[in-house]
Image (cartoon, helix red, strand yellow):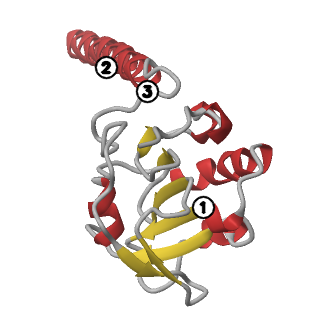
Amino acid sequence: MPILIAAVAVVGSLCLLDLLLTFGVIRRLREHTALLTTVAPGEAPAAIGLPAGELPAAFSSVTTDGEPVSGTSGLRVVAFFSSRCSFCPERVPPFADYLNAHRIGRDSVLAISVGSGDAPAPYLSGLAQAAQICVEPEGGDICGAFKVGAFPAFVLLDADGAVAVSGHDPAALPGPAALPEPATV
């Protein structure tokens, strides 16, 4: 009988320890969630890429339609999605809504599918009517030009082709009409 009592005490102690560790993990997850959600709308963490006001480096690519794209001339929005990103598929519908709400034409939008071989990530098929789509490997020309370090990334360009605003959530971006007019020289 004393062995049975000792075994129950050991199992009870282990269960109590497990419960305490679980509460600790839950608390840490809540802290991390709070840290991730404290980024203000329109504010970009340093990992997104170029800061506001900087021009991206020169780049060139070909869209999935075979059209050449080079530099930011004529572009208003550039979006970066990765085939390995778990958040990217859920950001595509709000991105399409953003483009529709602000009436941004397909020729002014470039969506980059990173690391998905020769075809865009399957979840980008819904953007074919709203954006030009390019496919590139990780560390490709366009990602390098914008210094993108995290996905998804959305970059709103001013009329001069410089970065105006960037972020991970398209709903937090202002409309292109809200940007100041370019300086005239």
Residue type at the position of mark 3: Glu
In the rendering, at what x and y percent does residue 108 appear? 62, 61
Q: Nearer the viewer, residue 65 or 178?
A: 178
Residue type at the position of mark 1: Val
In the rendering, at what x and y percent does residue 116 appear? 43, 75
Residue located farthest toward the front when viewing the structure as drawn: 185
Distance CA(mark 2)–CA(mark 3): 39 Å
| Label 2 or label 1, whichever comes before in sequence order | 2
Asked whether the residues under the numbered discs 2 and 3 touch, taking CB atoms below 8 Å apart as contact, a structural biologist would say no
In the rendering, at what x and y percent does residue 95 appear? 65, 49
> How many neighbours does mark 2 have within 10 angstroms: few (below 14), some (14-19), or many (20 or more)?
few
Residue carrying label 1: 109
Mark 2 falls on what kind of element?
A: helix
| Rendered residue at 26%/10% (across/down) | 9
Work out whether residue 55 can be spotted: yes
Residue carrying label 3: 43
Q: Quadrant of the N terminus?
A: top left
